[in-house]
Image: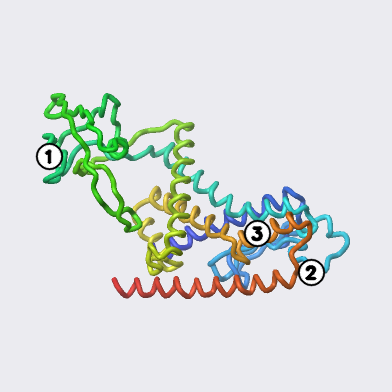
Amino acid sequence: MSFVIGFVVVLGVLIFFHELGHFIVAKAFGVGVEKFSLGFGPKILAKTVGRTEYRLSAIPLGGYVKMVGEQPDEELDPADIPFSFTHKPVFQRILIVASGPVFNFFLAIFIFFGIFWFSGLMMLQPVIGEVKAGYPAESAGIISGDKILTINGSPIDNWSEMAETIMDSNGSPLEFTMLRDSRHINLSVTPADDVMENIFGEEQHRYMIGVSSTGEVITKHLGPVKAFTESLNRTYIICKLTILSVVKVFQGSIPAKTIGGPILIAQMAGEQVEQGLVNLLAFIALISVNLGILNLLPIPVLDGGHILFFSIEAVIRRPVSIKTREIAQQVGIFLLMMLMVFVFYNDIMRFFEK
């Protein structure tokens, strides 16, 4: 049951905010909106307010906003021309199309802001768990249970700060002050250059001293300003990793079989439902960033493809020909269909491998 609930909640929230972005900016520029739909295909529920039909459709794998004059060759009543998308300045059309992905980023920022403000920021304590044999920490006399207080006189509040300080040392000796059995211990440790795998499975050189955390977690409560700053930073980090992951897939550094689709999202969403509301919200924020970036790819039929055509129009001072756009959209649809088949195949194979 959690599988279904998670899938419906995650996709519903993501689709709603994405289409809401298109809807709000279109209305702000005076574009008439004929339909606002969550889902594709036959409508299940519908209500018309003004000229807009708000509908819930049968296939919950997307949504759309149908605007007046959306197609360049569409025949319009002269009275509708002021409300036509095609007849708006090109920069307005770019903003309307870009607003969907942008609202996905706004959603992630908003969710992270709420989590950090109300639940705080969870961080690993800088307490030593395992000391690896043959590494600098063992040679220097660091033992399990030591709590790092300062490095080179700078306070260390969490494990990430300690790790970053060590990696930035470039192999220079570091002066550690630690708490051991209620006593302050001062030790000098010289980080060693070691080879390890990053999150993409690639080998890289990093300075380290050979310790691992106990896993003890502390919660740092944040005010609204700090929570907002942290939410921007977290969204930026996810954007950076997502873009880098896409590049690595095309480079072949990451196996294409790791790409997941709706089935994987549903499985993961179900797991987050079981783990609690905060985990589910953080998962929605993560997928929202991924959806925003995916839609900005310059592939025809995606928002990024439309932005590309409108940008070309802004440069050459005339719209791209309808024939060119139709061919490009057919290619885009074919590519998306192939991608959907591929991710469904990956999801099914991953399911049977468990």
Residue with the mark numbered 3: 308
What residue lies at 75% left-to-right and 70% top-to-bottom?
322
* Residues tagged 2 and 1 counted as in contact (Cβ below 8 A): no
Who comes first in sequence, dot 3 or dot 1? 1
Residue with the mark numbered 2: 73
**Mark 2–mark 1 distance (CA, rounded to whole Å):** 73 Å
Q: What element carries label 1?
A: helix
Looking at the picture, how far across and down is residue 42, in whole percent? 62, 73
**273 left or right of 140?**
right
Circle 3 packing at 10 Å, graded few (<14), some (14-19), many (20+), is: some
Who comes first in sequence, dot 2 or dot 1? 2
In this picture, is 26 found above or below 344?
A: above
- Specify whether residue 176 is in view: yes
Circle 1 packing at 10 Å, graded few (<14), some (14-19), many (20+), is: some
Q: Is mark 2 on a helix, strand or loop?
A: loop
Q: Nearer the viewer, mark 2 or mark 3?
A: 3
Looking at the picture, how far across and down is residue 261, in whole percent? 45, 67
**154 left or right of 80?**
left
**63 left or right of 215?**
right
Looking at the picture, how far across and down is residue 68, in whole percent? 76, 61
**Mark 3–mark 1 distance (CA, rounded to whole Å):** 56 Å
Q: Which three-letter amino acid code belongs to the residue tagged 3?
A: Leu
Circle 2 packing at 10 Å, graded few (<14), some (14-19), many (20+), is: few
- Specify whether residue 1 is in view: no
Residue with the mark numbered 1: 138
